[in-house]
Amino acid sequence: MGRLDLLFLGTPQVRHAGQVLVFPTRKVLALLIYLTVSGGLHPREQLTALLWPESAEGRARASFRRALSLLRQVLDETPGTSHLIVEGEGLGFDLTSDCTCDLHTLQAAAQATNVRVVLSSRSLLDQFQDAATLYRGEFLGTFSLPDAPDFDDWVRGQRAFWHRRMEALFDKLAQVQEEAGALADALETASRWRVCSPFNEQAYTRLMRLYFAAGDRGPRSRSMQTVRRCSQRNFIPCRVPKQMPWSGASVARLPHELARSSQCPREASHCCL
């Protein structure tokens, strides 16, 4: 059957036995994504209503049957070697089959950021770096189904959830790298975090602390200028000081400076890496 690799952080990509699969329609791919991410078994009627809400009942059912048949063909499903679970009117994805998913890797790494069990720095670095490498952008990138608003609402919720997981990962990875003395790697991680979350003051604080530790003042000034431009562009009344004395204490005060008046948004709507 071959291993199935599901890559949903960024533009969705599915590989079977190392080969990138081509889906005949966006809804065939959407069906696989929903079954994989949501887990469990779903009634066919629910899936039909989710993906074909504007079609007449008979036509919607026919469209669902066609999409399921095409999905089986794309995945090269055969009796006894299937990634899909079909039980009566229920349909699901078998997460115990031969498959990998970048979401699972990110989730495990994000959960490890809160675990109090002491792990070696090497173990943490390996786990966090593996997850960071897989992160190509926001959940599904710009993928959407304009004629299926409930599916798009679900995608937006998932996008916000995985964005928070990404932030926890990049924050912890930069911290572990800094503690290990790998300042260049920590700066790269914090820079990626800043790109993904341009309005998150914690990302800027982490980045400027690292620039301070590296003794590089120029990028710190540019970071402050970027914060100021972002607040002006989005009409956010954040009072970012025009001059900031670059000491460890002043960098540590940055979140409080940004928090005066209205706070800047914590999450970006898109991420392009």
Image (cartoon, helix red, strand yellow):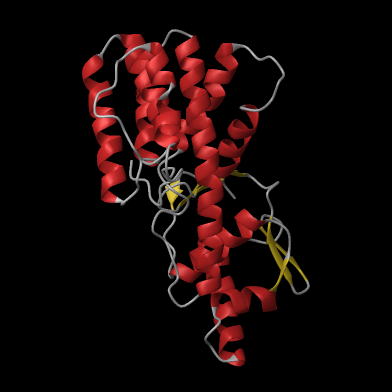
- The part of the image, by quadrant, that contains residue 43 is bottom right
Q: Is residue 217 above or below residue 128?
A: above
- Which residue is nearer to you in this view: 72 or 153? 153
Q: Position of residue 228 (x, y in %)?
A: 27, 37
Q: Is residue 255 left or right of residue 223?
A: right
- Which residue is the extreme one toward the front? 261
- Which residue is nearer to you in this view: 257 or 208? 257
Q: Determine the residue positioned at 23% across, 28% down.
A: 222
Q: Determine the residue positioned at 68% across, 79% down.
A: 45
Q: Is residue 38 above or below residue 257?
A: below
- Which residue is nearer to you in this view: 115 or 35? 115
Q: Is residue 222 left or right of residue 33?
A: left
Q: Is residue 264 above or below residue 147?
A: above
Q: Position of residue 104 (x, y in %)?
A: 60, 41
- The part of the image, by quadrant, that contains residue 65 is bottom right
Q: Is residue 151 left or right of residue 82?
A: left
Q: Determine the residue positioned at 50% across, 44% down.
A: 163
Q: Position of residue 128 (x, y in %)?
A: 53, 26
Q: Quadrant of the C terminus?
A: top left
Q: How many marks?
A: 0
Q: Position of residue 259 (x, y in %)?
A: 45, 36
Res. 228 visible in picture: yes
Q: Is residue 139 above or below residue 198?
A: below
Q: Determine the residue positioned at 38% across, 41% down.
A: 199
- Which residue is nearer to you in this view: 138 or 92? 138
- Which residue is the extreme one toward the right? 88
Res. 76 visible in picture: no
